[in-house]
């Protein structure tokens, strides 16, 4: 089953990079054991058509974006979705897929979320040998030696140390993929999109790369989405929590979502990620989802949309809080990682926003 899945993922090779079809991946995944099936493309799980048909239906909103410089590995095609409804481009979300998937696998997000003003980028990882796939090649942001991950082997009572994590992954691969993600951010900045309007996110392996990129970025981004993933110390003990320029990164909004029955990346690692990122002073919205394995459901997607709407909204001032609608206040507070549990009236939301802005 592993060999069959790998062949389906690898697909035809063009100029040293591999492509994959959702239908091939889905067919292989459907016949594979559960632990392999769980990394099948999200788009296939949500019943989407292939990208060509999807693009035709949506008037060609998708286009490919070339990699901008050379890396250790050849990165695949990066898909682009223009802002919904032909609206003016004001913000960008970069979404990284998981192991064995492609950018196509998460491209449904653009049409599902229908966010005016938001351009989406769906990059594809290099096709490389993956140790946990018996050394056979599949799209991956970095090599990983074992699946499922075992939280007991990753410092069960502490954040995942960089040294311990390096026993399970290839750090040079991670650095290469983080550089690629940050180059996508720099390209958006060069095109005139402010850092405060750029979000990076990802699923599983992609979530790890997105979090590392957000924490290491020279400028503070609008936020970061980490789904069914893990984030440990990004540097040695003495350097943890600092960006590429050595500055302390804090108050960066994070959304961390995790399935409660995830067999690949156990929920304990989601809790570790929440604790570690919060310990750096960042604003974290942490959600778990009952009955969800190494995947996502519609509730999680809706929560991600609310988070994105909040972090991409223009910032509020104390003077504007009282006149802001309850709906907008809710999205803004969620985007800032503020717990709004128990806020039943607008005044509750006003009080929360006032408290946050007064810090």
Image (tube, helix red, strand yellow):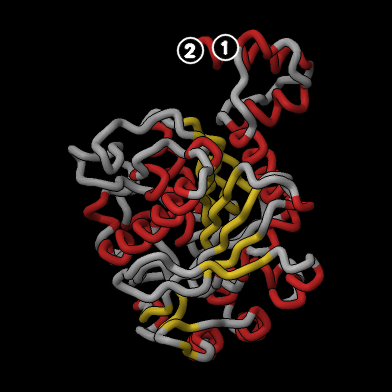
Q: Nearer the viewer, residue 29 or 75?
A: 75
| Secondary structure category for the residue under label 2 | loop
* Residue reaching furthest to the right: 57
Tell me if residue 150 comes above or below residue 226 in the rendering. below
* Residue reaching furthest to the front: 191
Task: List x then y, in percent, for residue 236.
Answer: 20, 45
Residue 140 makes an appearance in the image: yes
Please give the name of the residue rendered at 49% of the width and 60% of the height, measured from the top-left corner.
Answer: 204
Q: Residue 69 sits in which quadrant?
A: bottom left
In this rendering, position of residue 286 left or right of residue 144 = right
Report the number of discs: 2
Task: List x then y, in percent, for residue 157.
Answer: 33, 42
Please give the name of the residue rendered at 69% of the width and 31% of the height, measured from the top-left corner.
Answer: 331
Q: Nearer the viewer, residue 282 or 243?
A: 243
Disc 2 target residue? 359
In this rendering, position of residue 292 left or right of residue 3 = right
Disc 1 target residue? 355
Q: Residue 101 sits in which quadrant?
A: bottom right
Q: Nearer the viewer, residue 325 or 148?
A: 325
In this rendering, position of residue 293 left or right of residue 217 = right
Task: List x then y, in percent, for residue 147.
Answer: 42, 69
**Mark 2 touching mark 1, by CB under 8 A?**
yes
| Secondary structure category for the residue under label 1 | helix
Q: Is the residue marked by circle 2 packed among few (<14), some (14-19), or many (20+) residues within 10 Å?
A: few
Task: List x then y, in percent, for residue 351.
Answer: 66, 11
Tell me if residue 73 comes above or below residue 13 in the rendering. above
Tell me if residue 3 comes above or below residue 309 in the rendering. below
In space, the residues marked 2 and 1 are separated at their CA atoms by 7 Å
């Amino acid at each position: 089953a592993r060999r069959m899945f790998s062949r389906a993922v690898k697909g035809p090779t063009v100029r040293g990079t591999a492509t994959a079809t959702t239908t091939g991946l889905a067919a292989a995944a459907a016949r594979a054991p559960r632990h392999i099936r769980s990394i099948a493309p999200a788009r296939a799980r949500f019943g989407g058509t292939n990208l060509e048909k999807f693009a035709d239906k949506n008037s060609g909103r998708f286009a490919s974006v070339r990699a901008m410089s050379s890396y250790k590995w050849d990165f695949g095609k990066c898909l682009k979705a223009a802002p919904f409804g032909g609206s003016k481009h004001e913000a960008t979300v970069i979404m990284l897929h998981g192991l064995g998937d492609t950018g196509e696998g998460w491209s449904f997000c653009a049409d599902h979320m229908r966010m005016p003003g938001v351009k989406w980028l769906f990059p594809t990882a290099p096709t490389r040998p993956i140790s946990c796939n018996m050394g056979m090649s599949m799209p991956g942001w970095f090599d990983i030696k074992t699946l499922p991950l075992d939280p007991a082997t990753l410092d069960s009572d502490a954040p995942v140390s960089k040294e311990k994590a390096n026993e399970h992954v290839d750090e040079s691969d991670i650095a290469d993929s983080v550089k690629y993600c940050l180059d996508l951010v720099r390209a958006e900045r060069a095109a005139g999109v402010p850092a405060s309007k750029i979000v990076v996110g990802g699923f599983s392996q992609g979530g790890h790369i997105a979090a590392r990129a957000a924490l290491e970025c020279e400028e503070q981004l609008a936020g970061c989405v980490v789904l069914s993933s893990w984030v440990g110390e990004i540097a040695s003990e003495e350097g943890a929590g600092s960006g590429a320029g050595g500055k302390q990164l804090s108050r960066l909004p994070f959304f961390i979502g995790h399935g409660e029955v995830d067999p690949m990346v156990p929920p304990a690692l989601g809790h570790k990620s929440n604790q570690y990122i919060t310990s750096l002073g960042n604003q974290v919205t942490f959600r778990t989802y009952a009955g969800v394995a190494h995947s996502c459901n519609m509730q999680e997607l809706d929560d991600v949309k609310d988070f994105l709407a909040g972090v991409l909204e223009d910032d509020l001032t104390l003077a504007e809080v009282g006149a802001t609608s309850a709906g907008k206040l809710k999205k803004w507070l969620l985007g800032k990682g503020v717990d709004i549990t128990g806020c039943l009236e607008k005044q509750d939301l006003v009080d929360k926003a006032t408290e946050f802005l007064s810090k």
